[in-house]
Every structure is written in structure tokens, then in C-alpha cells.
């Protein structure tokens, strides 16, 4: 499915739309069974092996307030993609819960679609979308390094863990509506967040003085 007349809005998964707890002893919104193929090495809690050489994780998931609402509303304005550095066997189960009828999330990308740095960090290089104009792509992610290769396309968001009063996604929706109608969304993002300033200075304090104080 292609969305010729719509821009593409990409969401990170973990700490952006949801948070996966380290243990099911921690309060959660929903517990989901995650099946890992035999032989794959993944460090998780509550992992057990079955007789068929399949590995299952009972994952306690906290869903960020307005996560489903933002996917539903924005799917009418954008092509929606979730791009996560997590394994597909985990992410697909979570995304199937968020969007069980596959109405809102149009495509999914996973760890194997990321670029891994020598330090082991997974970066989401948006050039993977070779058939889309980079100027029409937006990536919402709690980890700014994820969009380090295309900083002008990134919208940083505060990480989510368990705060039920969190309003980040609700507050983001009006801004995304503006971007949906913008001819040059990268310029709007640049003017809003000024993230390129971080590439021009040696410290965060220097950036703060320039961006906030104007010195």
C-alpha cells in the first residue's frame, strides 16, 4: 500500500509508544506472551523453554497514554510506520495488541532494518525508504541518536516508563496536524527543535545558552 498524497510519520516503539517492564512483578497494563525462536540469544526476564524448543517471555507492557489515539487520528493524515530497534518476534506481538485489525499502522520495521554502529547502537537511517522523499518523512523517537543521520527529520520525545499522567502524545498531535499540511516539514522541525545546534557546539550547556538564552 502506498500513500502518494500523504507524508510518512514514523514512530519508535519502546519508551515512545510503550514500555516493556523488566519483570512481571512490576505493575503493567497488559501481559503479552512473546515467543522467541530456538537458538536465538536474547536477555530477558521470565523466559522459559518449552518441549518444542520455543522460548516464551511473559512481558508486562505499559502503554503510553494516548498511544492508540494518536495512531488512530494520525493514520487519517499520514502513512504510519513503526520503526523499532527491537526484535520482530517481540514488536509484532505488541503492535498487534495496539492495532489488532491493522487499521492504523501501515508498515513495520525492526532491528534488522537498523544500522548498527561499532559501539553497538542501532540507528534508524531513513534512507532505507528509498522510494520516499526524505523531506516527507518524520521520525518520533525518545532516543535522538536514532535519527542522527537525518536530524532534520526527527522529533524527540521524553521517554515513557509508567507515568499515567503523561501528556506527551496528546500534546504532540496538534503539531503533527500542522506538519501534515506543511510543504517543507523538515524546515518546520528545524525551526522548532533546533537540533542541528548540537552538532555545532562542544557541550550541552553551550547549546542551551544559544537556543534558550540567545547568547
Image (tube, grey):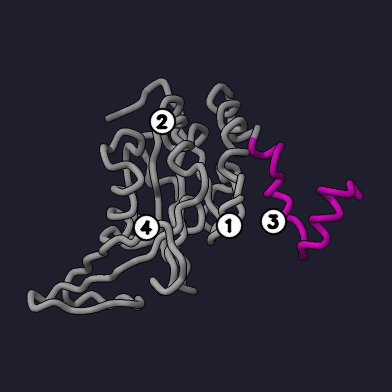
Asked whether 210 falls inside the magenta stretch, the response is yes
Label 1 crowd bin: few (<14), some (14–19), many (20+), radius 10 Å: few
- Which quadrant: the N terminus? top left
Label 4 crowd bin: few (<14), some (14–19), many (20+), radius 10 Å: some
Give the SS element for disc 4.
strand
Identify the residue position indicated by label 1 in the image: 163
Find the residue positioned furthest to the left: 52
Instruction: Name the residue at 56% across, 32% down.
Output: 176
The mark nearer the N terminus, 4 or 1, is 4
Q: Where residue 32 appears, x then y in whole percent?
A: 30, 60
Give the SS element for disc 2.
loop
Q: Nearer the viewer, mark 4 or mark 2?
A: 4
- Our reading of the magenta stretch's main secondary structure is helix
Q: Is residue 72 above or below residue 91?
A: above
Circles 1 and 3: CB atoms closer than 8 Å? no
Q: Where residue 197 appears, x then y in whole percent?
A: 73, 51
Identify the residue position indicated by label 2 in the image: 75
| Distance from the alpha carbon under mark 1 to that under mark 3 | 32 Å
Identify the residue position indicated by label 4 in the image: 30
State the image quarter where residue 47 is shown.
Answer: bottom left
The mark nearer the N terminus, 1 or 3, is 1
Identify the residue position indicated by label 3 in the image: 199
| Distance from the alpha carbon under mark 3 to that under mark 4 | 40 Å
The mark nearer the N terminus, 4 or 2, is 4
Circles 4 and 1: CB atoms closer than 8 Å? no
Q: Is residue 71 above or below residue 179?
A: below
Q: Which residues are magenta?
A: 189-215
Instruction: Name the residue at 81% across, 48% down.
Output: 211
The mark nearer the N terminus, 3 or 4, is 4
| Distance from the alpha carbon under mark 1 to that under mark 2 | 25 Å
The mark nearer the N terminus, 2 or 3, is 2
Amino acid at each position: 500500500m502506498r500513500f502518494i498524497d500523504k507524508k510518512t510519520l514514523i514512530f519508535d516503539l519502546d519508551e515512545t509508544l510503550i514500555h516493556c517492564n523488566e519483570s512481571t512483578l512490576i505493575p503493567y497494563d497488559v501481559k503479552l506472551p512473546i515467543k522467541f525462536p530456538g537458538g536465538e540469544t536474547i536477555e530477558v526476564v521470565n523466559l522459559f523453554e518449552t518441549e518444542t524448543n520455543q522460548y516464551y517471555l511473559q512481558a508486562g507492557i505499559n502503554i503510553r497514554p494516548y498511544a492508540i489515539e494518536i495512531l488512530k487520528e494520525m493514520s487519517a493524515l499520514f502513512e504510519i510506520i513503526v520503526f523499532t530497534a527491537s526484535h520482530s518476534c517481540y514488536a509484532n506481538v505488541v503492535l498487534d495488541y495496539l492495532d489488532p485489525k491493522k487499521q492504523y499502522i501501515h508498515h513495520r520495521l525492526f532491528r534488522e532494518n537498523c544500522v548498527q554502529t561499532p559501539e553497538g547502537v542501532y540507528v534508524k537511517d531513513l534512507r532505507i525508504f528509498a522510494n520516499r522523499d526524505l523531506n516527507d518523512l518524520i521520525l518520533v523517537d525518545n532516543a535522538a541518536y536514532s535519527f542522527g543521520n537525518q536530524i532534520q527529520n526527527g522529533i524527540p520525545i521524553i521517554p515513557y516508563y509508567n507515568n499515567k499522567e503523561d501528556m506527551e502524545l496528546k500534546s504532540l498531535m496538534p503539531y503533527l496536524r500542522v506538519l501534515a499540511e506543511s510543504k517543507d516539514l523538515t524546515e518546520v522541525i528545524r525551526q522548532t527543535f533546533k537540533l542541528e545546534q548540537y552538532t555545532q557546539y562542544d557541550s550541552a550547556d553551550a547549546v542551551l545558552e544559544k537556543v534558550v538564552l540567545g547568547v
